[in-house]
Amino acid sequence: MLIDYKKVNVYQEDVLILKEADIEVNEGELVYLIGKVGSGKSSLLKTMYCEVDLYKDETEKAEVLGRNVVTIKRKEVPALRKEMGIIFQDFQLLHDRTVEKNLQFVLRSTGWKKADIANRINEVLEQVGMSDKKGKLPHELSGGEQQRIAIARALLNNPKIIIADEPTGNLDIETANGVMQLLKDITSTGTAVVMSTHNIGLLSKYPGRVYRCKDGAMSEVTNEYAQLDLTEDGEESNNNND
């Protein structure tokens, strides 16, 4: 099991927003977190890469890639994150550098040898269909292209898990479907994808395990969504993060 949370309390700025949350993620799974703005989806994801702390006396179990993220030491966090890919809604590309130099920056900072960097960049850009954008600056790319570059960046270190916070939130429907197909294809290689989304229509097109954050609690609702022919859900299709 790649992620194993049992009875985890999640706080946002000292306010308890998720109580006794349970979630499991296995190799090659696509896992969705759904819920309204402020329901705790983003904060829960941040606990997985130690951006938001968990408290020992309020957590029964919280393991990510075999590490206890409650007791993990700060100096050990970079090694954990190196085994993960993190995708943000706003892409977080370096705007003064080309696509190639954005990817070089990550590989150099994570210890790759100079001789291997160019080949790895070519591999991930081909995987996301962006081989011809290597010399472009981020502002020269569309939103969908920037998100594909962000996915390429997340793939650089062959992650076991990709954490994606609203990866389609700023994209039109057609572009969002392309990004989702890419993420779904990535799971077929054994990498798990855990993503928050307000776009409920994606759940029927790209089935996975579904957890809902609501009223301070989290529950698995996979069966509920597997039985529905979903379209865009007006209540939860808001594109804001929590």
Image (tube, grey):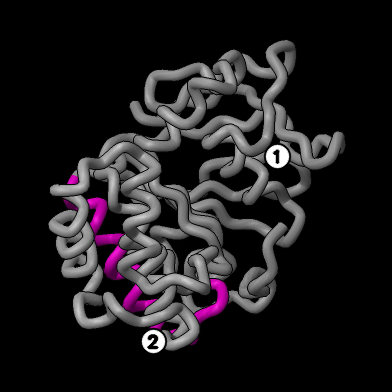
Q: Answer left or right for 151 relative to 234.
A: left
Residue situated in front as seen by the camera: 67 or 3: 67
Residue situated in front as seen by the camera: 63 or 136: 136
Please give the name of the residue rendered at 45% of the width and 27% of the height, measured from the top-left corner. 64
How many numbered circles are shown?
2
Q: Position of residue 42 (x, y in %)?
A: 63, 50
* Residue 73 visible: yes
Q: Quadrant of residue 183?
A: bottom left
Please rate how many residues cluster around mark 2, counting C-alpha atoms within 10 Å: few if below 14, some from 14 to 19, many from 20: few
Q: Amino acid at mark 2?
A: Glu
Residue situated in front as seen by the camera: 131 or 96: 96
Please give the name of the residue rendered at 29% of the width and 70% of the height, measured from the top-left corner. 181
Q: Label for residue 166? A: none
Give the position of the N terminus as an image quadrant: top left
Q: Badge 1 is on which residue?
A: 217
Question: Overall secondary structure of the magenta stretch?
Answer: helix
Q: Which residues are magenta?
A: 169-189
Residue situated in front as seen by the camera: 159 or 224: 159
Please rate how many residues cluster around mark 1, counting C-alpha atoms within 10 Å: few if below 14, some from 14 to 19, many from 20: some
Q: Which secondary structure, mark 2?
A: helix
Q: Which secondary structure, mark 1?
A: strand
* Residue 28 visible: no
Q: Label for residue 174? A: 2
Magenta-span inclusion, residue 171? yes
Q: Amino acid at mark 1?
A: Ala
Please give the name of the residue rendered at 61% of the width and 19% of the height, measured from the top-left corner. 70
54 vs 68: above or below: below
- For marks 1 and 2 on the same chain, the one whose residue lies earlier in the sequence: 2
